[in-house]
Image (tube, rainbow, N blue to C red):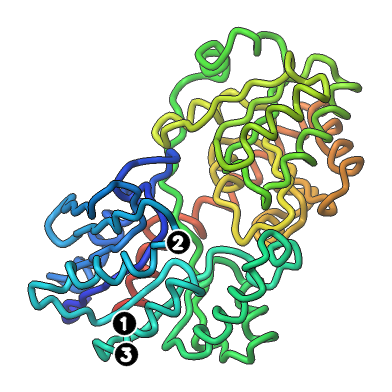
């Protein structure tokens, strides 16, 4: 492959884990890998990331040559935009001039990214990692109708748009009239590494209470989109039929205490284990302890946790919102149930827990379909091809 000219990419993000590692995600590792693949295609390329941080002063980190990260030093998210402008000035103070501005959201930072792109005569490539046209998302915040209006304006002005699922691409074509040729479907790469420990060892390490019981798992953020009240309703119905079931929830978020309180109110305390945030490197052992993964989101743009479960050979039951519906084949590589339907979802979980050969067959089929299309090198190369394009 003939080397391409180097490119300079400025990314605007709200993910604090780039600097702090909060939330157990793998954002930093993914972007280090993106840089590695980008430099194979276009030697000398650089990525600079401006991201939300809560430290009292702006933070700067240079993990490797070519990847610099600038924190906004925002004591509250309300100050994210003005603090981001200060951080952008810091990132470009040495005369560094970006060729591409990319934003990890299409509304507040998207509008700012559009302005910055115009200032530098750079290409503007916003990203969408959520279901912008979901009625459920619209109801989550009184600000979301305004955010959708901003996003629609920004997306129409973009040079290209990156989305993480075909369904999202179809929505942009249908609702905004965007050209399909200007929308790139590139899911988020998964850096998941399957544990070498046997299931019994994973269970012993996680909790002695898992001995001799089925394990149903959730991994993710405790937020409204994940519809964890529905998850607990399903757990209650499953427990009534299969008393030897145990429910493990890994993650944290704004609804964490509310979910724990609801579990206690529903009599699930002795059957639930709340792990809190788990470092990403330790998640394989959590998946390794599970018999089944349950996702009850009201809306989900992609669903990386679905891929992680499949790579760990854990069968998945998920509500049929955009992300999981784009990954799972119902009855073959997983089970899809109507969003909000506790009875149908509980029935799917119960049927799979009581059908060990069916679970193993489903997990094997899912693994066979997920490894190639969602491999991290393919997805990283698709993304760097977008960045290097005309």
Q: Residue at x 39, y 62 (%)?
A: 79
- Alpha-carbon span between mark 3 and mark 2: 24 Å
SS class, disc 1: helix
Picture quarter with the N terminus: bottom left
Coordinates of residue 8 in the picture (x, y in percent): 21, 75
Coordinates of residue 208 in the picture (x, y in percent): 60, 7
Coordinates of residue 48 in the picture (x, y in percent): 23, 65
Q: Nearer the viewer, mark 3 or mark 2?
A: 2
SS class, disc 3: helix
Which comes sooner in the sequence, label 2 or label 1? 2
Q: Which residue is mark 2?
A: 78
Which comes sooner in the sequence, label 3 or label 2? 2
Pick the residue in front: 247 or 44. Answer: 247
Q: Residues within 10 Å of mark 1 (few under 14, many from 20)?
A: many
- Alpha-carbon span between mark 1 and mark 3: 5 Å
Task: Looking at this view, name the residue that lies furthest to the left.
Answer: 94
Q: Which residue is mark 1?
A: 116
Q: Residue at x 63, y 46 (%)?
A: 223
Q: Which residue is mark 3?
A: 118
Q: Residues within 10 Å of mark 2 (few under 14, many from 20)?
A: few
Pick the residue in front: 82 or 345. Answer: 82
SS class, disc 2: helix
Pick the residue in front: 198 or 15. Answer: 15
Mark 3 and mark 1 in contact (Cβ < 8 Å)?
Answer: yes
Picture quarter with the C terminus: bottom left
Count of numbered marks: 3
Locate residue 288 relative to residue 46 in the image: left or right: right
Question: On residue 87, which mark appears?
Answer: none
Q: Nearer the viewer, mark 2 or mark 1?
A: 2
Q: Residue at x 58, y 90 (%)?
A: 178
Q: Residue at x 59, y 36 (%)?
A: 313
- Alpha-carbon span between mark 2 and mark 1: 19 Å
């Amino acid at each position: 492959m003939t080397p391409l000219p180097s490119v300079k990419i400025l990314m605007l993000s709200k993910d604090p884990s780039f600097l702090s590692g909060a939330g157990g995600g793998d954002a930093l590792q993914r972007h280090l890998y993106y840089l590695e693949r980008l430099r194979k295609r276009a030697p000398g390329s650089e990525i600079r990331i401006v991201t939300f941080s809560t430290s009292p002063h702006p933070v700067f980190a240079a993990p490797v040559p070519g990847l610099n990260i600038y924190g906004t030093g925002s004591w509250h998210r309300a100050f994210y935009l003005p603090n981001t402008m200060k951080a952008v000035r810091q990132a470009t103070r040495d005369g560094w001039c970006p060729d591409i501005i990319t934003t990890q959201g299409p509304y507040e930072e998207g509008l700012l990214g559009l302005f910055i792109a115009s200032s530098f005569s750079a290409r503007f490539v916003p990203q969408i990692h959520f279901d912008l046209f979901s009625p459920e998302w619209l109801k989550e915040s009184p600000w979301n109708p305004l955010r959708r209006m901003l996003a629609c304006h920004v997306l129409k002005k973009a040079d290209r748009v990156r989305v993480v699922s075909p369904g999202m691409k179809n929505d942009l074509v249908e609702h905004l009239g965007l050209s399909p040729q200007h929308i790139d479907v590139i899911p988020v790469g998964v850096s998941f590494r399957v544990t070498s420990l046997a299931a019994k060892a994973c269970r012993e390490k996680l909790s002695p209470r898992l001995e001799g019981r089925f394990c149903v798992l959730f991994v993710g953020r405790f937020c409204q989109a994940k519809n964890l009240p529905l998850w607990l309703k399903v757990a209650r119905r499953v427990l009534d039929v299969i008393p030897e079931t145990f429910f493990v929830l890994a993650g944290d978020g704004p609804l964490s205490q509310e979910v724990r309180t609801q579990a206690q109110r529903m009599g699930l305390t002795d059957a639930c284990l709340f792990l809190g945030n788990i470092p990403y490197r330790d998640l394989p052992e959590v998946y390794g302890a599970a018999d089944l993964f349950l996702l009850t989101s009201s809306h989900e743009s992609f669903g990386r946790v679905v891929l992680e479960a499949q790579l760990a050979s854990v069968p998945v039951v998920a509500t049929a919102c955009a992300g999981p519906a784009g990954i799972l084949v119902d009855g073959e590589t997983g089970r899809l149930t109507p969003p909000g339907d506790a009875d149908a979802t509980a029935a799917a979980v119960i049927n799979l827990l009581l059908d060990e050969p069916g679970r193993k067959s489903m997990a094997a089929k899912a693994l066979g379909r997920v490894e190639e299309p969602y491999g991290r090198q393919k997805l990283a190369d698709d993304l760097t091809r977008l960045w290097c394009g005309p």
